[in-house]
Image (cartoon, grey):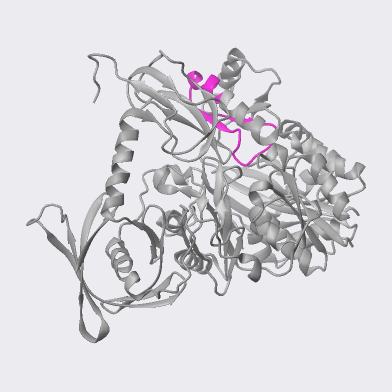
């Protein structure tokens, strides 16, 4: 087993990965950019190495600097988290060349899957169903128009180089094609360093169902069941749950088997996620394999009791999976809500800033994976995900109610978060019935406004608080004050990386 | 004693008196700016205890809340019953409104800090109200900012890759002589 692992990421996922590493008795190395000096993942790690300036290209995406940091700290393996370099085959190859274990799939599988277009073709060859689409390395306005008309509007432009809603545009008419293409292309170039775009027919209101798979180096492979991720806003998942309300054991077994087959076809090893779209007639289509740990992996951990990060590390160290499909029996129901730094009252504009106060929910069946603390300033340079709240219950309704009360207790002041929006979704009657598809939010929540129900109560609290607040109370920092209440005392041991 | 506050678009006057057994008697009036036309929205018997940090326990007519209050740059940020509210003292509210109105009426300013990706117009260009004039990226998502009015682009105060923040006037658009839009 590894003695020390470098985590090439930031935010909540770096914190979460380090937690398991520490539990396994493995030393942790964080990397960070200049604006992240006081980020939680840096404070949680045993050692930390500064990579350079804030722009990702000069820090979290700089392969050479990260390999160098691993060498200098004598880390024998690298966990890439999600996003950044996690699905970049050049990175996993660079690790291999440097004699460092990459905790993820082998470069060859990644090379295939990093191209959403090449993986589409491989799946088709192995009998995994795919959606009608078109590719070209040489799009122009005419070709875009011809292919889109052949498929029929609406169509989806997608980045061949990666997912997560970046570099993706829905196009309803030929007149929008050129603008949508150049925006998608720029976004894809910035996010993945690859501006290649392909086109797919847009299915109407499908469900987004994905399967977690685990494959070891000895040829063993299982799936850990599905995650339903249909509650999406602009192709960004915000609520996920497992199990999916419309899968019966038979369809689950068929899709799970297809998922493992898809992973094998790609030569996949380690933890991965096979995404499918499921239409109203219960036909499923391969979307892509995410060759990384998913944001929403905790809900699978909740119902299976398996620590997926631990499995990733064990598989990377060459250990056998030790799991048999027929022995895996997920129990209960789990839901995840993603907390982004964004303002639901202003068209979900990202809103970085300083967190003035933070109270995270606790209680039976509640888990919070967080990358923030009171006094922390959310930088503008990175993805706006702050934290995830996961609720587990013995059935869907129990998990849903737990999530509602957990969100009611999630207080983050100083920045805008979508917490009350998420709660409104969970309390919507169609959500309660389990009628979720990717058209859910545009259909029911296009005109959502924050509740004004407790305005007068808030007013009384603001008016009376100064009367009882003791003079010596430590005031929360204001953004223009440089002094932050130090999280150093509360965050365990850490030391600065060599420079 | 009484104090005015603004939440969203509405102004409230809060009168706090002492009630029974250490409680406060709190009356909330709406529209205090039109003296004589005040409407008492609610009256509460309130008890409040400071718990720790920014946390308070509040009983309003016997109903209990655990809330958070912290003063931010724009006013008091309040968390109560799972909802967040910004409670603004009137001086700050007036300034905020003026800035917002000024910005909205005349200029193109980003709603959040970000980086300029692309300038879509040049000085002298005629633009329509709602036409995209500049692309700004924040947290890796691109947003196109629209011109708030029809007219002529008179100045561009930024360039590609510049860091910009709310309040920065990126592009100035002047109405054409004689051409007015609502």
Q: Quadrant of residue B108?
A: top left
Magenta stretch in the rendered image:
A156-181
Q: Quadrant of residue A114?
A: top right
Whether residue A268 is visible here, answered yes or no, is: no
In the foreground, B94 or A57: B94
Whether residue B174 is in magenta: the answer is: no
How many marks can you see?
0
In the foreground, A21 or A129: A21
Residue A185: x %, y % from top left: 62, 27
Residue A112: x %, y % from top left: 80, 36
Residue drawn at x 46%, y 44% is A348
In the rendered structure, the answer to whether residue A316 lies left or right of residue A410 reads right
Q: Quadrant of residue B123?
A: top left
In the foreground, A45 or A140: A45
> As drawn, which residue projects farthest toward the bottom?
B21
In the foreground, A224 or A488: A488
In the rendered structure, the answer to whether residue A253 lies left or right of residue B16 reads right
In the rendered structure, the answer to whether residue A461 lies left or right of residue A222 reads left
Whether residue A92 is visible here, answered yes or no, is: yes
Against A143, residue B14 (above or below) is: below
In the rendered structure, the answer to whether residue A476 lies left or right of residue B128 reads right
Residue A368: x %, y % from top left: 59, 64
Residue A142: x %, y % from top left: 59, 12
Against A156, residue B71 (above or below) is: below
Q: Quadrant of the N terminus of chain A?
A: bottom right
């Amino acid at each position: 087993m590894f003695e020390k692992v470098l985590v090439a990421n930031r935010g909540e996922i770096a914190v979460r990965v380090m937690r398991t590493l520490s539990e396994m008795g493995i030393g942790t190395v964080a990397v960070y950019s200049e604006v992240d000096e006081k980020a939680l993942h840096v404070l949680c790690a045993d050692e930390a190495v500064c990579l350079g300036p804030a722009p990702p290209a000069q820090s979290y995406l700089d392969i050479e600097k990260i390999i160098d940091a691993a060498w200098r700290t004598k880390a024998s393996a690298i966990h890439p988290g999600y996003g950044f370099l996690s699905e970049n085959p050049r990175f996993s190859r660079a690790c291999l060349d440097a004699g460092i274990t990459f905790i993820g799939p082998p470069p060859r599988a990644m090379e295939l899957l990093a191209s959403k277009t090449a993986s589409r073709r491989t799946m088709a060859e192995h009998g995994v169903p795919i959606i009608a689409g078109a590719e070209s390395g040489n799009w122009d306005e005419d070709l875009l128009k011809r292919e889109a008309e052949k498929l029929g509007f609406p169509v989806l432009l997608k980045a061949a180089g990666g997912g997560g809603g970046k570099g993706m545009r829905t196009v309803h008419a030929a007149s929008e094609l050129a603008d949508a293409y150049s925006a998608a292309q720029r976004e894809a170039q910035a996010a993945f360093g690859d501006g290649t775009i392909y086109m797919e027919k847009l299915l109407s209101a499908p469900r987004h169902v994905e399967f977690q798979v685990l494959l070891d180096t000895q040829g063993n492979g299982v799936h850990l069941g599905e995650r339903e991720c249909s509650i999406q806003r602009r192709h960004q998942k915000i609520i996920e749950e497992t199990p999916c309300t419309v899968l019966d054991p038979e369809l689950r077994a068929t899709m799970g088997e297809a998922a493992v087959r898809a992973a094998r076809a790609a030569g996949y090893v380690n933890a991965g996620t096979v995404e499918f779209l499921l239409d109203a007639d219960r036909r499923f289509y391969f979307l892509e394999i995410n060759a990384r740990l998913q944001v929403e992996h905790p809900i699978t951990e909740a119902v299976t009791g398996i620590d997926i990060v631990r499995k990733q590390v064990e598989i990377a160290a060459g250990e056998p999976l030790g799991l048999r499909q027929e022995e895996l029996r997920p129990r209960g129901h789990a839901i995840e809500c993603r907390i982004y730094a964004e303002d639901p009252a202003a068209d979900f504009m990202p809103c970085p800033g300083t967190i003035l106060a933070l109270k995270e929910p606790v209680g039976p069946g509640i888990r919070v994976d967080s990358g923030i603390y009171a006094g922390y300033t959310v930088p503008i340079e990175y993805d706006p995900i702050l934290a995830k709240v996961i609720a587990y219950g013995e059935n869907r309704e129990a998990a849903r109610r737990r999530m509602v009360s957990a969100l009611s207790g999630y207080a983050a002041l100083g920045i805008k978060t979508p917490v009350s929006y998420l709660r409104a979704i969970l309390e919507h009657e169609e959500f309660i019935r389990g009628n979720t598809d990717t058209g859910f939010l545009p259909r029911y929540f296009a005109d959502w406004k924050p509740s004004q129900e407790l305005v007068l109560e808030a007013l009384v609290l603001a008016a009376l608080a100064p009367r009882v607040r003791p003079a010596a109370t430590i005031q929360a920092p204001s953004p223009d004050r440089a002094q932050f209440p130090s999280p150093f005392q509360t965050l365990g041991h850490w030391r600065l990386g060599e420079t | 004693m009484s104090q005015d506050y603004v939440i969203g678009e509405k102004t409230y006057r809060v009168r706090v008196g002492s009630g029974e057994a250490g409680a406060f008697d709190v009356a909330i009036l709406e529209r205090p700016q039109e003296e004589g036309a005040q409407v008492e929205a609610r009256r509460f018997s309130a008890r409040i205890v400071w718990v720790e940090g920014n946390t308070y326990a509040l009983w309003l007519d016997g109903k209990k809340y655990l809330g958070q209050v912290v003063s931010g740059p724009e006013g008091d940020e309040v968390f109560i019953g799972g909802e967040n509210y910004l409670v603004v003292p009137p001086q700050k509210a007036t300034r905020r409104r003026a800035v917002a109105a000024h910005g909205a009426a005349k200029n193109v300013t980003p709603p959040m800090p970000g980086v300029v990706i692309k300038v879509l117009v040049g000085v002298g260009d005629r633009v329509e109200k709602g036409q995209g004039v500049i692309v700004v990226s924040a947290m890796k998502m691109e947003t196109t900012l629209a011109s708030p009015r029809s007219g002529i682009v008179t100045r561009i105060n930024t360039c590609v890759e510049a860091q910009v923040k709310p309040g920065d006037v990126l592009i100035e658009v002047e109405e054409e002589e004689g051409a007015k839009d609502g």
